[in-house]
Image: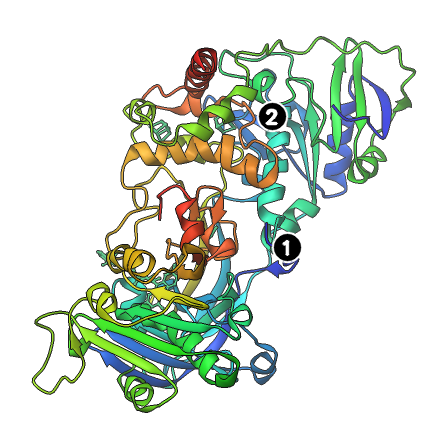
């Protein structure tokens, strides 16, 4: 939890008014919208388009900053072996995202690290600079949410520009950043919080395992039959990674006809057999077992060693989407039990 | 963690013109590339061991080391083994054609730390490409280094790359050379050795005193050569330097493809000592 820069109270109807105002200004507003049974971030013109009850969106926030496919350059091949090519601007229209969940906002922190730890990725950076996130505390979780075990839980404000805590007759707004302050200027009827406001209770996401135990076990169990067990429940389809808010692997490919085309980057996934395949036929991760291990090790060990934070925020999407019933919570619980057993016997 | 580069990356390559094409072997071609933009050419610098992403537009990008020496300015060379989609397209180019290049990426061979020391270069097949960059780097500053030995082998005489340069190195009296081809790969007029690199190296008189070894080649060659260097010739694993070639897409620590444990081969490598590699999970 972070101390907000500013706290404001707003009456019911504030959101409707804000969306109206932003749309009149021509600002792009994205919010969770239900369509064909799935809730996803879509452009809205009015707050009544927003889904009323949703635990979380199907596709995570990452798609707003890092689309599943995007053109990174264009080329023309006029004739005679010459090629004319040029970069493209990231489509980074100023955007306000309303209704993001704390887990997904915490995942943006992971993406910020990846896309900036060394080189600064311009496509990601331009969108990031033009996007304001309005997070909202979760009043409801489902059985697959486990943010309380790996991240800040359903009321975590870190990562939001403005964080909304619903109250009985409106909301308490926590203004977290400069971008948030700028947005707050468009919010009518906001009054400084008196400190007596009582936000409605957030969803209970109690701790389901001791996350501090995980890395210790991973450190010592690179070679272990455990990974074979885990992999037997994996089809290698990549659905978990596509919907994971922190997974960021990508591929770069050219698409063209005889005259010209474009270079694109597309989401990719370390669960795919071809991901690491060398052209010689050698594959450093030759089986599903090593690929499942890499995905988990990356989130709970390698990323921690490298950047000092975990790369799983407990959103539960990978559990909801997996067609084979893979459940990362059960895997993590098994690991903590194994760790307890080994440290107990030592 | 290496220092952050603090540069922006937009994946836009330099425009390069194919100045010269040399067919090294039936499946390896060396391309000499010039920058289309003179200002870019002047600003461009790199270090031996670094790599880049070379692209044929419409086919995609592929990773190759820069095979020329940083002491030779104004151009770069890469030697490409025909293996798949992009490498096939690179082999189909004509002189004057345009390709893309972005880089240089990755770390480099510790050439400055090698000053005053004896150097053993060991290469196998196309693995001589990154080694060649260091060899010319050292030869162009010859008096800064001790004894230089080049041990190079390929499957057959036909498969030896840089044939003209091998002759040149063989003719110099300030370099020791050991060239070999696999048994059955020799021709009647082959004057070098016949035998696998590890075997030939094991029989050679080599001192590890004040020496460093640069070793690049197919994984199988590295696997059998390392014990020869360590057990027979007494090299410490810290002094045997090689490169890893995990598959890469971005080259700049983002796409997640090249990792070995918590290391990014594209950022922390591709150059590693054998001691460093031993510490990694075996995913290379
Ligand atoms: C740091 C580093 C340095 C390197 N340096 C060098 C170097 O100096 N020289 C060098 O030669 N190599 C080098 N490599 C290896 C080089 O990157 C690969 O050989 C190259 O990327 C292969 O690209 P490709 O597009 O031709 O192969 P791909 O197309 O990716 O081939 C993948 C596999 O698919 C097969 N395949 C390709 N196209 C098709 C198709 N249409 N249908 C069916 N199968 C297909 C291929 O036969 C191959 O087995 C280096 C690699 C790294 C990481
Ligand atoms: S969604 Fe399930 S089956 Fe598909 S890769 Fe992930 S764990 Fe494996
Ligand atoms: S690994 Fe699963 S639970 Fe963790 S952040 Fe990714 S999708 Fe959410
Ligand atoms: S090549 Fe993309 S992370 Fe190393």
On what subunit does the disc labeled 1 rest?
Answer: B
Residue B72 appearing in the image: no
Camera-nearest residue between A43 and A148: A148
Mark 1 CB near ligand 4 (8 Å cut): no
Side of A181 where B184 appears, left or right: left
Q: CA distance from mark 1 to mark 2?
A: 28 Å
Q: At numbered mark 1, what does the secondary structure look like: helix, strand or loop? A: loop
Q: Is mark 2 within 8 Å of ligand 3?
A: yes
Q: Which residue is mark 2?
A: A103
Query: Residue A117's spot in the image, x, y percent?
Result: 62, 48
- Count of numbered circles on the image: 2
* Residue at position x 83%, y 34% in the image: A186
Q: Quadrant location of residue B40?
A: bottom right
Quick check: do tags 1 and 2 share a chain? no
- Whether A263 is drawn above or below B191: the answer is above
Residue in the foreground of this view, choosing between B252 and A76: B252
Q: Residue at x 43, y 44 (%)?
A: B279
Left or right of A344, for residue B152: left
Q: In the rendered image, is residue A166 in sight?
A: yes
Chain under callout 2 = A
Q: Which residue is mark 1?
A: B4
Q: Nearer the viewer, mark 1 or mark 2?
A: 1
Q: Residues within 10 Å of mark 2 (few under 14, many from 20)?
A: many
User: Residue A37's x, y, as percent?
Assistant: 46, 21
């Amino acid at each position: 939890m972070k101390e907000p820069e500013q706290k404001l109270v707003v009456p019911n109807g504030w959101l409707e008014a804000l969306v109206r105002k932003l749309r009149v200004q021509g600002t792009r507003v994205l919010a969770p919208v239900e369509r064909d049974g799935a809730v996803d971030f879509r452009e809205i013109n009015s707050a009544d388009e927003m889904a009323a009850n949703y635990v979380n969106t199907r596709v995570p926030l990452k798609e707003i900053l890092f689309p599943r496919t995007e053109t990174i350059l264009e080329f023309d091949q006029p004739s005679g072996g010459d090629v004319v090519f040029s970069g493209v601007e990231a489509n980074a229209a100023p955007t306000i995202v309303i209704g993001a969940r704390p887990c997904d906002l915490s995942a943006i922190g992971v993406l910020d690290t990846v896309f900036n730890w060394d080189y600064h990725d311009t496509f990601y950076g331009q969108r990031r600079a033009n996007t304001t996130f309005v997070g909202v505390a979760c009043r409801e979780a489902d059985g697959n949410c486990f943010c309380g075990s790996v991240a800040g839980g359903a009321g975590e404000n870190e990562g939001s520009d403005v964080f909304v805590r619903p109250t009985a007759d409106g909301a308490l707004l926590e203004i977290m950043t400069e971008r948030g302050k700028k947005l707050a200027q468009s919010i009518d009827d906001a009054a400084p919080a008196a400190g007596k406001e009582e936000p409605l209770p957030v969803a209970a996401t109690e701790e389901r395992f001791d996350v501090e135990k995980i890395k210790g076990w991973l450190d010592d169990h690179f070679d272990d039959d455990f990974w074979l067990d885990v992999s037997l429940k994996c089809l290698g389809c990549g659905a978990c990674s596509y919907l994971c808010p922190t997974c960021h692997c990508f591929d770069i490919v050219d698409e063209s006809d005889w005259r010209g085309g474009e270079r694109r980057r597309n989401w990719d996934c370390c669960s795919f057999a071809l991901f690491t395949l060398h052209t010689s036929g050698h594959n450093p991760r030759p089986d599903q077992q090593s690929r499942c291990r890499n995905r988990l090790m990356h989130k709970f060990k390698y990323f921690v060693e490298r950047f000092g934070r975990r790369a799983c925020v407990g959103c539960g999407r990978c559990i909801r989407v997996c067609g084979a019933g893979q459940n990362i919570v059960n895997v993590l619980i098994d690991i903590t039990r194994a760790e307890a057993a080994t440290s107990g016997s030592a | 963690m290496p220092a952050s580069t603090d540069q922006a990356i937009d994946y836009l390559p330099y425009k390069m013109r194919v100045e010269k094409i040399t067919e090294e072997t039936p499946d390896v071609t060396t391309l000499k590339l010039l920058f289309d933009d003179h200002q870019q050419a002047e600003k461009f610098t790199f270090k031996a061991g670094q790599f880049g992403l070379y692209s044929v537009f419409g086919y995609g990008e592929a990773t190759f080391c820069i095979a020329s020496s940083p002491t030779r300015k104004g151009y770069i060379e890469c030697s490409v083994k025909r293996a798949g989609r992009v490498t096939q397209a690179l082999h189909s180019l004509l002189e004057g054609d345009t390709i893309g290049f972005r880089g240089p990426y990755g770390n480099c061979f510790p050439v400055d730390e090698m000053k005053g020391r004896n150097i053993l270069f060991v290469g196998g097949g196309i693995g001589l490409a990154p080694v060649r960059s260091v060899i010319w780097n050292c030869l162009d500053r010859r008096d800064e280094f001790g004894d230089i030995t080049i041990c190079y082998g390929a499957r057959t005489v036909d498969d030896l790359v840089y044939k003209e340069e091998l002759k040149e190195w063989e003719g110099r009296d300030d370099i020791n050379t050991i060239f070999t081809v696999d048994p059955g790969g020799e021709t009647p007029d082959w004057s070098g050795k016949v035998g696998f690199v590890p075997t030939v190296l094991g029989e050679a008189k080599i001192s590890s005193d004040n020496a460093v070894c640069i070793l690049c080649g197919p994984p199988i060659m590295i696997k059998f050569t390392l014990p020869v260097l360590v057990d027979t010739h007494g090299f410490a694993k810290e002094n045997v330097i090689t490169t890893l070639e995990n598959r890469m897409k971005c080259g700049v620590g983002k796409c997640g493809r090249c990792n070995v444990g918590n290391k990014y081969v594209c950022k922390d490598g591709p150059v590693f000592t054998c001691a460093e590699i031993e510490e990694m999970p075996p995913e290379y």
